[in-house]
Amino acid sequence: MSLLLLSGGLLSAQDLVFSQFYTTPLHLSPAYAGNTISPRFSANYRLQWPSLPGKYETFSVGYDKFFRKFNSGFGATLLADDAGDGIYRSFALDLHYAYRLQINREWFAKLGLQAGVRQSRLDFDRLIFLDQLSPLDGFPGPGTDTGEIRPDQPNATFLDLGAGFLIYNGSFYAGLGVKHLNTPDPSVLDINSNSYSGLSPTISLQAGAELPLRINSYFFRNSFLSPSLLVIKQADFYQIHAGAYLGLEQLFAGLSFRHTVNNADAAVITIGLRQEFWKIGYSYDVTVSGLPGPSGGSHEISMVYILDRPQPSKYNDCFGLFR
């Protein structure tokens, strides 16, 4: 979710986190690049709070692959975020690299780097400032102008850097990702430029496991339970996302809960289908926070396409959740 705070200018923005973060792991850490031997393609769409004014929409596509010759994974992601029905839009094109280290027979580590170009665009004419509000009803009167200075360029383009670390074996993984290492400035208004220090780094901690399930059924031979934990920190904002994912051969489902420091945010229900080279998932965020009025929750659709069908015996790791 991107947040736009206006009080005489654009103050800050908050990174979006997908509920199905395991289908877009490169947005958390570049260390996840190349977790499949064959090329992996992904696409995600998220619609947040459709019943509230100024809903948020996000589109993302990605590609990554492991190259044995270089013992490295390479990836690329493209993200488009629309906040406030087009008032504020952002675009990001990122390249990801991860080098794999074999610690011993069972444990591996990956070091990742990310570099990208981002752009923020603001529709200035649709903004409402304090000096336009009526003291009677709060709404701007006809033809009400603002004293704010229109920006010469209603967009900002900047370089964004990140890094990540991942350690795993056949049952457990843990990772760290840091975005905006160079604290870039995405603002398009010059208000408070003397005190604004740039986009705060986003730090994510990820951990999870893959527990095989012994189900005496021909249809559910390759089954597993994958508990996961995701902790996000950006400036003063914290988010904890904890839950479990159940894979039953062609079917999968998940249940998780998202909480901030001060209040519960949402319960996330996920269902999906996996067939041969692809899988598709749908999740719904049930809003449990104190938002005024019905929010309509959040809807998210994901698609993953891998150019081979990953079998459990093919990978000595615990990333079935991500495939």
Image (cartoon, rainbow, N blue to C red):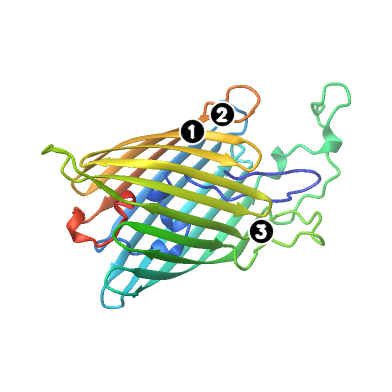
Location of mark 1 (residue): 267
Q: Amino acid at mark 2?
A: Val
Seen as rendered, the residue at the extreme left is: 218
* Pair 3/1: label in front: 1
Name the residue carrying label 3. 199
Q: Which mark is residue 288?
A: 2
The picture places residue 100, in percent across and down from the top left corner, at 35, 72
Instruction: Check disc 3 and report its element: helix, strand or loop.
Output: loop
Q: Quadrant of residue 301?
A: top left
Q: Secondary structure at mark 1?
A: strand
Who comes first in sequence, dot 2 or dot 3?
3
Q: Which is in the foreground here, disc 2 or disc 3?
A: 2
- Point out the tag, 2 or 1, that comes first from the N-terminus: 1
Tell me, yes or no, whether the two marked residues, 2 and 1, touch with CB atoms within 8 Å: yes
Along the line of sight, the residue nearer the viewer: 215 or 131: 215
Give the Cα separation between the discs numbered 2 and 3. 28 Å
Residue 149 image offset from top left, x and y in percent: 81, 50
Secondary structure type for disc 2:
loop
- Outermost residue, bottom side: 69
Residue at 74% from the left image edge and 62% from the top image edge: 197
The three-letter code of the residue at mark 1 reads Ala
89 horizontally vs 211: left or right: right
Along the line of sight, the residue nearer the viewer: 284 or 213: 213
